[in-house]
Amino acid sequence: MLDFGENLTGIIPRNEVDYITCDEYGFTKPSICKNKLNSYVQFKVKEIYSDNQVILSRKKANEEALNWMNENLKPGQIVKGIVKNIRKYGVFVEIGAGVTGLLHIEDISVSRIKSPEERFYSGQKINVMIKSIDKEKKQIVLSYKELYGTWEENVKTISEKMILDGIVKEADKYKNGLFIELKPNLVGMAEYQEGYEYGQQVKVYVKKIINDKKKIKLVIV
């Protein structure tokens, strides 16, 4: 039962619950399942009674979402979604009444992160881009980093000799420098120094911007 307030209640009969769930990898598959208590649910209104009670159908919403996926969804398309499950390798995002896609950790931002929880939380509403779709297997791969803007768009907001806030991300494997995140899609490199840890906030001086190589040289101050 669902409570809409103002004495209006809704019921999803047993034969109208989901027939979409996720496989072991988190991708959409048809299968009878039950909704979890307090979970976010999309549904269709099936019938309305005079006693302020509404009969709802999750199954019908599932069917329409699958049809929408098969008929309209294309790579490059931007859609709205809700973060449903966070794993160390990525985020599962529901983009419509049970239709779920996987956002791999490397597609979250240009700046590398150790955990998707650095960017997202369960239940968060986000926009995502369709990276690829396999309609036969009902598998959707998503991307998020494009929504932060391109390198060229981000670098327009900074200039040489500026002092900025940054976040230490990682060291070059040969210790040639430290990668510093200025924005999720904008990373510069500072001279390597011992004692700096992943996630540490620092102040940096913009020494040089090399536009043709998409590089930014920084100095930790």
Image (cartoon, grey):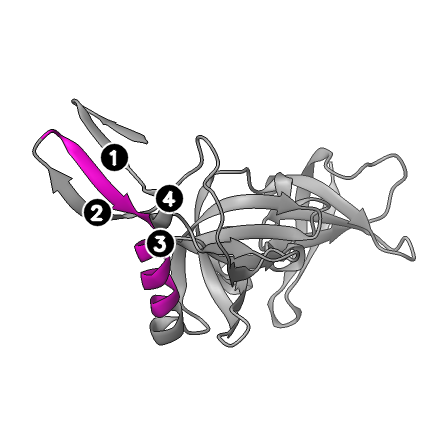
3 or 1: tag closer to the N-terminus: 1
Q: Is mark 2 on a helix, strand or loop?
A: strand
Three-letter amino acid code of the residue under disc 4: Arg
- Residue at 47% in and 40% down: 124
Mark nearer the N terminus (2 vs 1): 1
Q: What residue type is labelled 2?
A: Val
Marks 4,1: beta carbons within 8 A:
no
Which residue type carries mark 3?
Answer: Lys
Q: Is residue 161 visible?
A: no
- Is mark 3 in CB contact (under 8 Å) with mark 1? no
Q: Which residue bears the numbered disc 3?
A: 59
**Residue at 58% in and 42% down:** 119
Going from the N terminus, do you reach mark 3 or mark 2 first?
2
Nearer the observer: mark 4 or 3; the answer is 4
Q: Distance between the residues labelled 2 and 1?
A: 9 Å
| Circle 3 residues within 10 Å: few <14, some 14–19, many ≥20 | many
Q: Residue 14 carries which label?
A: 4
Query: Is 124 situated above or below 105?
Result: above
Left or right of 140, for residue 170: right
Please name the residue that numbered disc 2 is placed on: 45
Residue positioned 51% across, 69% down in the render: 138
- In space, the residues marked 4 and 3 are separated at their CA atoms by 10 Å
* Span shown in magenta: 51-68
Magenta segment includes 209: no
Query: Left of 96 or right of it: where is 33?
Result: right
Q: Where is residue 211 in the image (x, y as percent from the top left)?
A: 60, 67
Q: Quadrant of the N terminus?
A: top left
Q: Position of residue 24 (x, y in %)?
A: 66, 56
Q: Would residue 148 be found to the left or right of residue 45 on screen? A: right
Q: Which mark is residue 10?
A: 1
Is 61 in the magenta? yes
At mark 1, the secondary structure is: strand
